[in-house]
Image: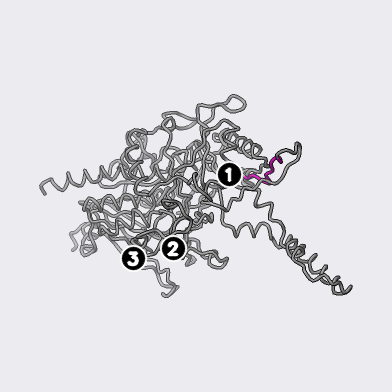
């Protein structure tokens, strides 16, 4: 053994490990699509997902269970929400079988053709090596697989959705294009809320499913199986094709070896039955091909941590970070004119908890100019919803509710002292409950678009960190803020931007970049097919490959790029399999 190299010893140690044609790390929009496509092409595939499965009915709603629904294995938390906090930005991503599809708002919008740009900005550039024409056939394939439907507009109760009608009216008044985008949601045909989906149990969870119940819980995980999330679509199909899907498996390291890669991961015990002080089990796989799909933050972090095993990685690693222009605004206390009574108004109901989270979108294109003639990079504004129980939290906060209840109790005490004969107290109880007008006439607005992708991720003391100067994106966010204010006023509401904006801080649910596409290794970490420069067999399929913001909700574009990349992986695999050994 003395004469053997370190690499030879390492190979001997793992000679008995499982070997696959491909190992896919992560089950989000890149990993699920890739795993399905490779399994469909008869490759042996192992998908490693660090999180747990979340079948319908398992998404928590109680305060106690929700408090445990975060991802922090060091604290023995194996929940769905994974929050990253940096100096200028917080990012919320998902951990679970199906990745971000578990908590996204189901919107499927293609990246506009004019936003596949080739332009420079101060200190960098945004250069897309793919076009809309390149992606169109893959967009279609993903939409078909996800069962895309537009929010119904021709039958009740959908046609009367208040927030949808308000956004349509606002877009018309402002002269902006408006649409009901395709959603990865099952509404039924004909659309009926809460109807059983025929054959719905044929999924990886073996769970029945129901059409959308219009309760605004998409971002908390759908307990009715109405979302056509990745676990019900791509992952179920991959499972039927024989893909080895392993949950609770967090990849820590990987390295190139002859004819492939070694991948090491730890197995989390999310049941709580094991020894809390025991170290997680370490496992190793061997793969001819490795596909990293751990998301923008996860993939970039893994590459930075394992960079010593890949010394030829592009210097672009960590660059081109973008939050996809995510921005939050609020319409407050909307009112409308009373027909036939000039000068008088009444509350305008927006009812944000009715319907899926997002039903419509308006677009401000990059060719248009702002109020002061400055160039607009382009963005979308979409209606937003949330579960009904949040209305109770807002309307019946402790202070307000206690005042109302105190008044009710004082009235009852006075009635007892005076011996009043009035025994019906329904109105008094109603007053104690409040009218609920604040939440019924208010609604969030979600913005996303083309911020400047000048952020850079790096390791600091072994932790992922982000340097991002918001100065270059300030005109974009100012224009977003101004347009949201105009939208709010056009539907009779007051406007409030996110409090974080006034603290010069943002939150994103769409982090992008870190391993950007480029035409050569100096420009990008991967080529336009997601193949890592300098390392044949290593690919990336997730939001990290974006050289800039997608603009609209990026999940569809991530999935389409992954589908396109899978074609090339399959071609490369077949070509090498045909070569004489």
Q: Gap between marks 1 and 2, in whole Å?
A: 28 Å
Q: Are marks 1 and 3 in contact (CB under 8 Å)?
A: no
x then y, percent, for residue 447: 54, 41
Q: What are the residue bounds of the magenta stretch?
A: 330-338
Q: Gap between marks 2 and 3, in whole Å?
A: 30 Å
Please say whether residue 461 is visible from this viewpoint.
Answer: no
Residue 102 vertical placement versus 144 (above, below): below
Image quadrant containing the N terminus? bottom left
- Comparing labels 2 and 3, the label whose residue is closer to the camera: 2
Q: Residues within 10 Å of mark 1 (few under 14, many from 20)?
A: many
Residue 348 vertical placement versus 193 (above, below): above
Lateral position of residue 261 relative to residue 480, left or right: left
Foreground pick, 216 / 286:
216
Q: What residue is drawn where x is 29% and y is 62%?
A: 284
Mark nearer the N terminus (1 vs 2): 2
x then y, percent, for residue 352: 59, 50
Mark nearer the N terminus (2 vs 3): 2
Foreground pick, 15 / 199:
199
Q: Which residue is mark 1?
A: 445
Q: Which residue is mark 2?
A: 56
Q: Main secondary structure of the magenta part?
A: strand
Q: Residues within 10 Å of mark 2 (few under 14, many from 20)?
A: some
Q: Which residue is mark 3?
A: 282
Residue 561, image quadrant: top left
x then y, percent, for residue 332: 67, 46
């Amino acid at each position: 053994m003395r004469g053997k190299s370190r690499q030879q010893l390492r190979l001997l140690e793992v000679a008995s490990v499982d070997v696959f044609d491909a190992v896919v790390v992560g089950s989000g929009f890149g990993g699920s699509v890739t795993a399905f496509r490779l399994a469909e092409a008869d490759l042996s595939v192992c998908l490693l997902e660090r999180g747990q499965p979340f079948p319908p009915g398992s998404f928590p709603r109680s305060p106690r269970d929700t408090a445990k629904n975060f991802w922090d294995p060091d604290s023995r938390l194996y929940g769905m929400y994974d929050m990253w906090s940096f100096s200028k930005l917080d990012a919320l991503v998902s951990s679970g079988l199906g990745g971000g599809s578990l908590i996204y708002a189901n919107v499927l919008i293609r990246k506009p053709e004019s936003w596949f740009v080739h332009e420079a900005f101060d200190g960098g550039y945004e250069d897309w090596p793919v076009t809309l024409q390149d992606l169109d056939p893959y967009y279609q394939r993903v939409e078909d697989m996800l069962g895309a439907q537009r929010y119904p507009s021709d039958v009740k109760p959908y046609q009367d959705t208040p927030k949808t009608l308000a956004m349509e009216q606002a877009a018309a008044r402002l002269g902006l294009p408006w649409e009901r985008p395709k959603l990865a949601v099952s509404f039924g045909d004909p659309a009926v809320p809460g109807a059983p989906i025929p054959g719905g149990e044929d999924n990886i969870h073996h769970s029945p499913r129901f059409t959308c119940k219009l309760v605004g819980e998409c971002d908390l995980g759908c307990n009715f199986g109405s979302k056509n999330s990745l676990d019900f679509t791509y992952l179920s199909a991959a499972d039927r094709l024989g893909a080895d899907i392993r949950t609770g498996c967090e990849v820590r390291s990987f390295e190139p070896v002859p004819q492939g890669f070694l991948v090491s991961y730890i197995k989390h015990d999310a049941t709580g039955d094991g020894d809390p002080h025991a170290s997680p089990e370490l496992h190793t796989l061997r793969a001819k091909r490795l596909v990293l799909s751990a998301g923008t933050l996860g993939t970039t972090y893994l590459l930075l941590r394992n960079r010593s095993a890949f010394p030829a990685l592009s210097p672009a690693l960590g660059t081109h970070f973008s939050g996809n222009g995510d921005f939050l605004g609020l319409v407050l206390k909307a009112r409308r004119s009373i027909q036939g009574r000039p000068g008088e108004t009444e509350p305008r109901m927006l009812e944000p908890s009715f319907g899926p989270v997002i039903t419509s979108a308006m677009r401000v294109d990059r060719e248009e100019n702002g109020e002061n003639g400055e160039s607009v990079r382009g963005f979308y504004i979409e209606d937003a919803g949330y579960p009904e129980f949040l209305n109770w939290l807002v309307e019946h906060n402790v202070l307000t509710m206690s005042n109302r209840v105190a008044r009710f109790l004082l009235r009852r005490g006075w009635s007892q002292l005076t011996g009043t004969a009035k025994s019906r107290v329904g109105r008094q109880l109603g007053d104690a409950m409040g009218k609920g007008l604040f939440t019924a006439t208010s609604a969030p607005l979600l913005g996303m678009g083309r911020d400047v992708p000048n952020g850079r991720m790096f390791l600091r003391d072994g932790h992922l960190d982000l340097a991002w100067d918001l100065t270059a994106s300030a005109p974009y966010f100012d224009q977003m803020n101004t347009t949201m204010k105009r939208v709010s006023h056009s539907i009779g509401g007051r406007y409030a931007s996110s409090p974080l904006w006034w603290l010069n801080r943002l939150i994103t649910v769409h982090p992008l970049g870190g391993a950007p596409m480029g035409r050569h290794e100096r420009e990008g970490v991967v080529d336009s097919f997601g193949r890592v420069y300098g390392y044949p067999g290593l690919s990336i399929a997730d939001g990290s490959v974006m050289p800039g913001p997608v603009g609209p909700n990026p999940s569809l574009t991530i999935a389409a790029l992954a589908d396109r990349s899978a074609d090339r992986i399959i071609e490369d695999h077949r070509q090498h399999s045909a070569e004489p050994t």
